[in-house]
Image (cartoon, rainbow, N blue to C red):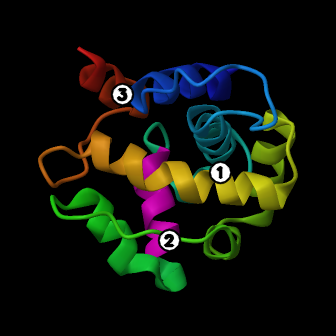
Amino acid sequence: MAGNDLGSLLGGLLGGSGGQGGSGGAGGGNILGALLGALMGGAGGSQAGGSNPLGGLLDMLTKSGLADQAQSWIGTGDNQSVSGAQIAEALPDEALQKAAAQAGVSPQEAADQIARALPTAVDKLSPQGQLPTGSLEEIIRAQNL
């Protein structure tokens, strides 16, 4: 439930008007919502920072050797890309599988979609070059005003 709400919010944030169906599967916002929902409520919930799992997610990426990329998304410069394989390695298996199941895609496809959507989402959620505080839902809603 929370994942779907987050997916809608993130989809709006990412400008996701690109059709519901089609071979692309779930949009970037939906897969990120599913992942953050999994990190918040299920697998990895305790490591993901409670009501703001984005900080916890970025911590996971930093600890997995993706500090430069994660920092580039928060900062005001160009966003560095990551691969699906890097995302799959950085995330708890359980959380990735849960997000993939919720989005109706394979874990590898989920990792690829997350790798494509996450830099833009983090960039838009940190317009001042800093990760905002508050619940993830409040942060996203503030960006949509």
Q: Position of residue 112 (x, y in %)?
A: 68, 59
Mark 3 or 1: the one toward you: 1
The quarter holding residue 8 reads top right
Separation (CA) of disc 2 from disc 1: 16 Å
The residue identified by callout 1 is 113
Pointer 3 and pointer 1: residues touching (CB < 8 Å)? no
The residue identified by callout 2 is 61
Of the two numbered discs 2 and 1 on the same chain, state the one appearing first in sequence: 2
Q: Quadrant of the C terminus?
A: top left
**Magenta span:** 53-62
Q: Position of residue 41 (x, y in %)?
A: 67, 38
54 falls in the magenta region: yes
33 falls in the magenta region: no
- Using residue 83 as the reference point, say whether residue 96 is left or right of it: right
- Of residues 30 and 44, the one nearer the viewer is 30
- Using residue 105 as the reference point, say whether residue 10 is left or right of it: left
Few, some or many residues within 10 Å of mark 3 (<14, 14–19, 20+): some
